[in-house]
Amino acid sequence: MLVLGVETSCDETGLALVRDGKLVCEVLASQTDMHAVFGGVVPEIASREHLRMLPLLLQDLLAKACASTPELGLTDIDAIAVARGPGLLGALLVGLSFAKGLCLGTGARLIGVNHLHAHLLAPGLEAELSTPALGLLVSGGHTHLYHMAASPDGPTRFRLLGRTLDDAAGEAFDKVAKLLNLPYPGGRYLDELAQGVEPDTRLFPRAYISNDNLDFSFSGLKTAVAEELGKRPHLTLAKMPTADELRAHGALALSRHGEELGLIAASFNWAVSETLRIKVERALDREPGVLGLVVAGGVAANSFVRKTMTSLAEQRRLALHLPGLALCTDNAAMIAHAGWQALRGGYAHGLDLESVPRGRAVPEDWAREAGFAAGETAAAHHPA
């Protein structure tokens, strides 16, 4: 089964082709530099850029696919998987409308994908996931814990264990970077600043751990960093560097207080990664029988988080599933892969599928096609 994935939930425009769970090819257009000047994503600009880029990316994707499979065209696509939420509503609507139009024109089936679940399934493109697993999603908008269980009839089952109460980990990274006058998205620069620096583990608190729940709150940590930087105003860059300047010279080279700045960054990175470790360990103690640990989302690219979770998985003797850096960011390959899981069990959506903005739960309202027995895949009904 050949599935086209469409990703437009925020500021990345992505298309990908996945055949029977394996990535064929993908294309991605990032808007990061465009939004950096505003200190964050501007929804209207993001939506217009998705609208402009999708037709161009589709041409590029088909050209790449034809390099390995000559004469492959739109009519060879069996289904289209689209990110339906959560995300920016206008951006989601652009992608959903694009997907519906392609379905109408080609007769392909349609499946709406939960963007958060797709992140957690993304490592499955690189290796089979060990389930049941504990899933940690760490992104700009969400820090969630899930119990993940494989299903014999297609889609993986997710049970939410803990969620973001206010600022997510990625949001805290970006806000701290903004306090230092670093451009959006700032998490990567804080990680870079912290390389090779020993953190001061007493400088910042581990956020929202003096409780017995599995929820997350990073607003207190962000406030603690803001108060500390208030005592060290010389650390804030006088002028916000451009992304090109940072790529060329690095964040440390643009500051006269590199050692002190590195200490702040390393201590903050440590506080975030330790908070995540404590909550993950708590969840593992409450979920016996878990075989794997899945860590996904943009913050899963952070070197402190990756090192901490690698160590934890080794201590707990769990299979660790950390996606490659390209799969940590928003991408269409994960959307196509998650959609394929549902489609192979005969699940699909109608053209009345709706987008779901951030703040609302994404329903599993897909319908199963008639004639599918439990455990049966789509191969007999929709041969590739």
Image (cartoon, helix red, strand yellow):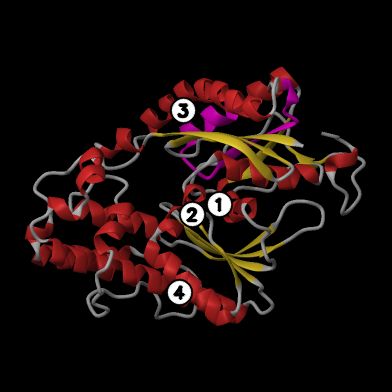
In this figure, which residue is indicated by the disc labeled 1?
119
Disc number for residue 297: 2
Magenta residue span: 75-98
Identify residue type, mark 4.
Arg
Q: Decide: few, some or many residues near mark 1? Use Cα within 10 Å; few <14, some 14-19, many ≥20.
A: many
Name the one closer to the observer, 153 or 325: 325
Task: Return the x and y of residue 306 as percentages of the image width and height.
Answer: 44, 65
In the rendered structure, which disc, 4 or 2, sits on the residue that comes first in sequence?
A: 4
- Figure quadrant of residue 127: bottom right
As measured in the structure, the alpha-carbon distance from the residue carrying label 4 to the one carrying label 2 is 16 Å
As measured in the structure, the alpha-carbon distance from the residue carrying label 1 to the one carrying label 2 is 6 Å
Task: Return the x and y of residue 61 as percentages of the image width and height.
Answer: 57, 27
The answer to whether residue 221 is above or below residue 108 is below
Q: Mark 3: which secondary structure?
A: helix
In the rendered structure, which disc, 2 or 3, sits on the residue that comes first in sequence?
A: 3
On the rendered structure, is 195 left or right of 75? left
Task: Return the x and y of residue 160 as percentages of the image width and height.
Answer: 60, 63
In this figure, which residue is indicated by the disc labeled 3?
50
Disc number for residue 196: none
Q: Are marks 1 and 3 in contact (CB under 8 Å)?
A: no
On the rendered structure, is 39 left or right of 214? left
Q: Going 46% across and 47% down the picture, which residue do you hit?
A: 329
Task: Return the x and y of residue 350 as percentages of the image width and height.
Answer: 73, 32
Identify residue type, mark 1.
His
